[in-house]
Amino acid sequence: MRAGERRWGGWRQPAAIAVAVAFLLPLWFMASGSLREPGTPPPRAPELLPRPLSATSYERAFDLVDLARHTVNSLIVAGLTVPLAVLFASWAGFAFLLVAGRTRTVLIGLSFAALMVPLTALLVPRFVLFRWLELTDTWLPLVAPALLGLSPFYVLLYYWSFRRLPTELFEAATLEGMRPLAMWRRLAMPLVRPVTVAIALLAFITTWGNFLDPLIYLFNPDLYTLPLGLRSLEALDRTNYPVLLAGAVVATAPVIVAFVIAQRYFLHEDRGAGWLGR
């Protein structure tokens, strides 16, 4: 091992701990603030644990707004969106691999161009389209982007990962008479499993925190997702910070659980041939 690599190895763990602390401290203060008595003002200085500890803010938050229903609604929307996004993004990325020449270049260029289009520029035409189809006030407008892979970035990431796989593998499968769908299912997808986990996690976080689309398309409070539930909570008790933080903890916990479940795929030494070129 070189001297520079040894020095970097010695600093790697403290640097990782410092980054982890920087990310965990806001979460800790959010959780500790939610355990204060409802109605108490924010502390003048950061406190690790409030005195006395109280879970009354959570009871108050669930009494003011039906957070349980909103959480279930968000889970349903995410449960529909994430698998569809992974499926269609991987199909599109594998299709990029199969086409050759100028067609592939044009498709990749269009995907990069689509990444540059602001989402706000599509709000009005999308709303007009879904209202004409009489799909507003349903969850379908929230799930429909998954049919396009949710984001061109996911399609390009899949294409890049598939391209890193040995071409001899697909050539041999073609000689064996394997069809493209079978190659996608039996060869390509198992070898890029960590990429699939990463895309699924990103899609879940994007869907879970989506506030603008539910605000535009949903009118029935029974269909509200959790971001709209937090907005209602803030409108009903604007200055009750422990109650607002309790709602924020409820909204943040599923994302943390999802990351904890997924992180073993990122930290595993053998990530597969499609992960970062290895």
Image (tube, rainbow, N blue to C red):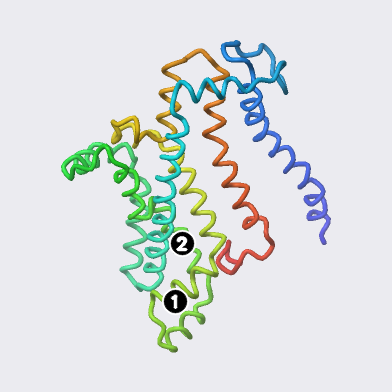
Q: Nearer the viewer, residue 75 or 93?
A: 75
Q: Residue at x 71, y 35 (%)?
A: 21
Please tell me how crowded label 2 is: few (under 14), some (14-19), or many (20+) other residues with Cα within 10 Å.
Answer: many
In terms of sequence position, does the residue under pointer 2 or pointer 1 come before the other? 2
Task: Please state which amino acid type lies under the numbered disc 1.
Answer: Met
Real-space Cα distance between discs 2 and 1? 14 Å
Residue 207 in percent (x, y) is at 43, 43
Q: Nearer the viewer, residue 247 or 184?
A: 247
Establish if 172 lies above or below 65: below
Tell me the quarter of the image containing the C terminus: bottom right
- Assign a secondary structure to mark 2: helix
Which residue position holds label 2?
A: 158
Q: Residue at x 41, y 38 (%)?
A: 210
Q: Are marks 2 and 1 in contact (CB under 8 Å)?
A: no
Image side of residue 124 versus residue 250, left or right: left
Residue 151 in percent (x, y) is at 39, 51
Image side of residue 60 versus residue 70, left or right: right
Task: Please state which amino acid type lies under the numbered disc 2.
Answer: Tyr
Q: Residue at x 50, y 64 (%)?
A: 161
Establish if 118 lies above or below 248: below
Within the image, what quadrant is residue 53 found in?
top right
Residue 95 in percent (x, y) is at 37, 68
Please tell me how crowded label 1 is: few (under 14), some (14-19), or many (20+) other residues with Cα within 10 Å.
Answer: some
Which residue position holds label 1?
A: 183
